[in-house]
Image (cartoon, rainbow, N blue to C red):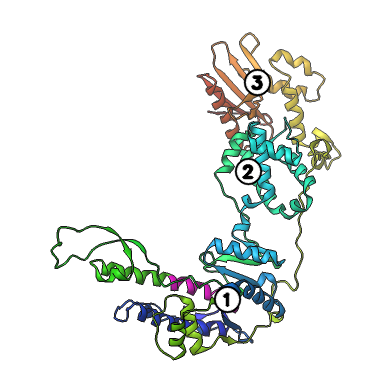
Amino acid sequence: MKDNWRSTCAVVDFNNEFYKYASSQIDRVLALQTDPLNLSAIYNDVHQDVKKEEAQQGYVKISMVEKDDTDATILESIKTARDAGARYGDIAILVRTNAIGSQIASLLISAGINVISDDSLQVKSSIIVRRLISLLSGAENPDDSLGSFLSSELEIDIPESYHSLVDLCEEILRALYRKDTQLFEGEIPYIQSFMDTLQDWVSINGNNLLLFLKYWKGIDPSLASPKDSHSVRIITIHKSKGLEYPYVIFPNIGSSNFYKPGVHWSHPDLAGTTLEGKAEGIYPVMLKQETNDTLFRADYLNEKKMQAVDNINVFYVATTRATKCLHIIAVEPTTKAFRQSVDNGKDYPFKDFSQLLYAFCRNHGHEFGKMYDFTKMDRDEPTETDFSTKYPSIPIGQRLKPSSDALDFFGEDGSVGGDASQRLAGIELHEILSIIRTTDDLDKVKNSRHYDFLRGKVLSRPELFPSGSEARILNETSIIDTDGTLHRPDRVIVSKQGSVRIVDYKFGGSDKKHKEQISKYVSLYRAMGYSEVRGYLWYVFKDKLIEVN
């Protein structure tokens, strides 16, 4: 884009100068000057105009250091930013690979600096979550040596029975919390993410531990990338596309060659040779300087160009993420012939971006602009705030159970309970219907205040309340699904001929989940071998019967 609304003038000016210089030099090194689509042509319109209204000009610094001094330079750069008023959350370190990111993360953690990185956001990176999964594996399979060993080492007794998978995990988590409270509290976001995943899975699939462990093995959940003012962000250049950070550190670029020799599948140029029409095809060819003198020269030169384009594009993404300050840390070239050539103003066949940066600095300097005063930066929030979280978990026997009846127990007219609430009346009617197998059972509920209402409804539905001699009646009888989940239809009528009618009572408005529920019951009875199965929803207050198959 012609206009840059993101960065300060120092950052924009540096990029304008550097990519004009870099593209021309790479074209020279790769002999692409006559190529109509060389790097200079691609980066011809790289120049941008600063549009961001900013009183401060910002700052760009290029540090050429020995390889062993890279770590110290990164830490010094962070200190410089902090001294200028930057928060840790203003700082991002861009890396080419996750492996480099992990090394830098270890460096910062050792220095007492909080870090957010791609690896650190993976839920499976949590020690507590990994321990929990191992203990669950031991609970599912006592022969699991790792789970049994861990349980023994941590002195954690895995419950032999449990109410649900959620309660089993919370029981184990409470034990892990007691064992290492500090570690546990440091990993609460990961624990919460795991439990959210478990809750979602259980709500659909039930409480089969083995199936959940198989599911967990096949996924790779991660935390959402937070904006944390207390942590330096480490991110790969690839994932930083489209993002921006006030202070960017871009280290470890010494290994970023314009292109790398290697095997490439190539077409030979056989035109005018004795092999024309005889040896066409694709061949694995080692791309190196000697390939320039073979029949694969055209593919070799094109591949070098494509790799150079890819590498300069990656470099461009990295150096354009900064809004206020950019610090590039490059390994200083050690080749004496190279340094002498550049220092004397002569051209040199550069091999990588470190050499290119060294030559650029000799002509343009190591610094652009002035260090930014971050205390004057506009922010959404005025000050840093601490963020803390807890994971309260109370054993089942010690939990308070809130009453769902409280909100609608009292009516505005002074009525209470079922007289005040259709929902509460539905609960009472449901309990009464669970007692009634046939119409003969109506006498059992004569003392109920709902007797007259319910008697009329029951007698109007002989198909749902046949005599005991006509069918076998199953009220609220549990069905066990293949995954161990329990289902409990309100009423099942099995005729002597073997047909089945399943009825669920409803006392409120219709809902598509009602049909899904009764359909599940129908499919379970069919799976048990009943060929003729019908499902019904009976909306009692409206006396409306809906067949669902």
**Which residue is label 3 attached to?**
460
Looking at the rendered structure, the kind of residue marked 3 is: Ser
Q: Residues within 10 Å of mark 2 (few under 14, many from 20)?
A: few
Relative to 388, say whether 417 is above or below: above
Where residue 389 sits: x, y (%)? Answer: 76, 55
Is residue 112 shown in magenta?
Answer: no
Using the numbered discs, state the Cα–Cα distance from disc 2 to disc 3 in whole angstroms: 42 Å
User: Could you tell which of marks 1 and 3 lies nearer the N-terminus?
Assistant: 1
Front residue of 131/444: it is 131
Q: Which residues are magenta?
A: 311-326
Disc 3 element = loop
Q: Residues within 10 Å of mark 1 (few under 14, many from 20)?
A: many
Front residue of 479/21: it is 21
Relative to 385, say whether 162 is above or below: above
In the rendered view, does 475 fall on the left or right side of 405?
Answer: left
**Which residue is label 1 attached to?**
322
User: Could you tell which of marks 2 and 3 lies nearer the N-terminus?
Assistant: 2
Looking at the rendered structure, the kind of residue marked 1 is: Ala
- Which disc is residue 355 wearing? none
Looking at the rendered structure, the kind of residue marked 2 is: Asp
Residue lying at the far top of the rendered structure = 469
